[in-house]
Image: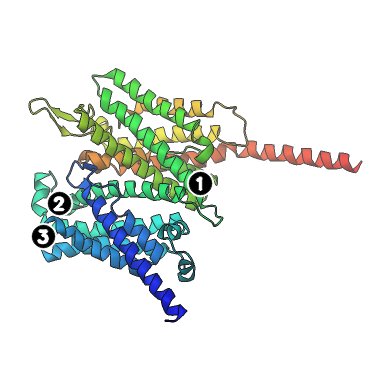
Amino acid sequence: MSKQSTKSNRENILRISTGGVCLALAFVLSQLKLFEMPMGGSVTPASTLPMIVYGVAFGPVWGFILAFIFSLLQLIGGWLVTPFQVILDYTIGYTALGFAGFAALKKDNRLKINGALERFRGTSIIKIIVFTIIAYIVRWLGSVASGVIFYADYAADAGYDSALIYSMVYNGSFLLADLAILSVVLVILYMVIPSSRKDNTLSTIQKFTAEFVGTFVLVFVGCGTAMAVGCDSTNGGGYILTALAFGLVIVAMAYSIGNVSGCHINPAVSLAMLISRRMTISEFWGYVVFQILGAISSAGLLRYLFGLTGKIDMTGVYDENECEMIYWGLGSNNLGGCDGNIVAGLMIEVILTFIFVLCILGVTDSKFKHGSFGGLVIGFALVLVHILGISFTGTSVNPARSIGPAIFAGGVALTDLWVFIVAPFAGAALAALVYKAVTRVKEENAVSVLEESSEAKEEKTEE
């Protein structure tokens, strides 16, 4: 047997044996349930992770094959479904995960590295996550189509007029939670596996991880406090406690992760920084993705913990006769305080975000000195806007903070969600433009002073 054929056989044995291990791991993980989503569907501890690692290690073709086999294995649990539903819900959905293999190393480089985990680590984590997100979108679309066809009757029971909307929300809720867990595990795995090649990816991932952690803590403490104490007109103390909770989280995070990522923990703040040219477009999208994932993960954990301990969500609706929650609020935002008026909701969120982001831009501007009290100022600014905004909209000023709870709360929180995405972005963009305009003269004067000082030094040197 020639050396070439021996090498080829070893490569095939490696692919097949690794594939078997990944299939076994994926199947076992898919049977473990972390928690049930409010609208149905269960979240597992990153069951698709082994397939993604395999696809990245051995390329998209092998990734597609393994994911296709996994889709068939999912039927072992005794699912009584039609072949067409199997294709939509499982075969297309899971096979799409092989798409993550397009982030793989070039074939020549893969052949030089034997270990699947080492091959995975040698690939850009950004590419892996991007391709994985695209795969999840395909999986979601297949599940939505399946839901519209086979579960249309459930839409009316859940209070939805449209089977399409119900299917989108139902499937999107647990798939987003699953994707959030998967992304976190992918990043952790990427960070703990040693790499022999030099790159700048790790520092970028550290920033993204910091943003995930910061947003997770913000939603967990802020929304968790709102759930525990309530924020309605009969409980004025709840206003202050919730406002302080959000503000104090910002203070704590600013002095802990601020040196790593700048502690944006808010897509609107990241947009303002992008407009102000303090970050690149690729950093912006990375920040936004991990901020949203952090918020989703935190909201899901809050829902699970409150349900597990039997605590009443004071921002939801509780049936005292049945002793159960009819509707989980999870501290989500809505237009109830504006009497459903969209224009009023948009205006209050734009103005409050403008105030908050303008404060951040001024305090964090490196051209002007503010001492070491920046975190405190920003935290108190968030308390300030919450004290007014809670009675109107619950105060968002942060798209990620609104998206996370809305996914698990459903209902009016999802219906009004677009307001709390559009308005904070608009307010942040306006703040960035206004700040640039009002500080332009001072910046020009500062530059002139520096130039004059430099010229004076040069003249002294010549003398």
Using the rendered view, name the quadrant where residue 331 is placed: top left
Residues at marks 2 and 1 touching, judged by CB atoms closer than 8 Å: no
How far apart are labels 3 and 1 at the CA level? 50 Å
Determine which of the numbered discs, if any, sits on residue 328 in the image.
none
Q: Amino acid at mark 3?
A: Val
Q: Is residue 110 above or below residue 25?
A: below
Quarter of the rendering containing residue 347: top left
Q: What mark, if any, has residue 162 been given in the picture? A: 2
The quadrant the N terminus occupies is bottom left
Seen from this angle, which residue lies furthest bottom?
1
Q: Secondary structure at mark 1?
A: helix
Residue under numbered circle 3: 81
Q: Are marks 2 and 3 in contact (CB under 8 Å)?
A: no
**Element under disc 3:** loop
Q: Residue drawn at (55%, 55%), measured in percent from left and top? A: 199
Q: Residues within 10 Å of mark 3 (few under 14, many from 20)?
A: few
Q: Which residue is mark 1?
A: 275
> How dense is the environment of label 2, judged by Cα within 10 Å: few (below 14), some, or many (20 and up)?
few
Q: Give the mark, 3 or 1, whose residue is nearer the N terminus.
A: 3
Comes first in the chain, label 2 or label 1: 2
Circle 1: residue type: Ile
Camera-side residue of 235 and 49: 49
Q: Position of residue 156 (x, y in %)?
A: 9, 47
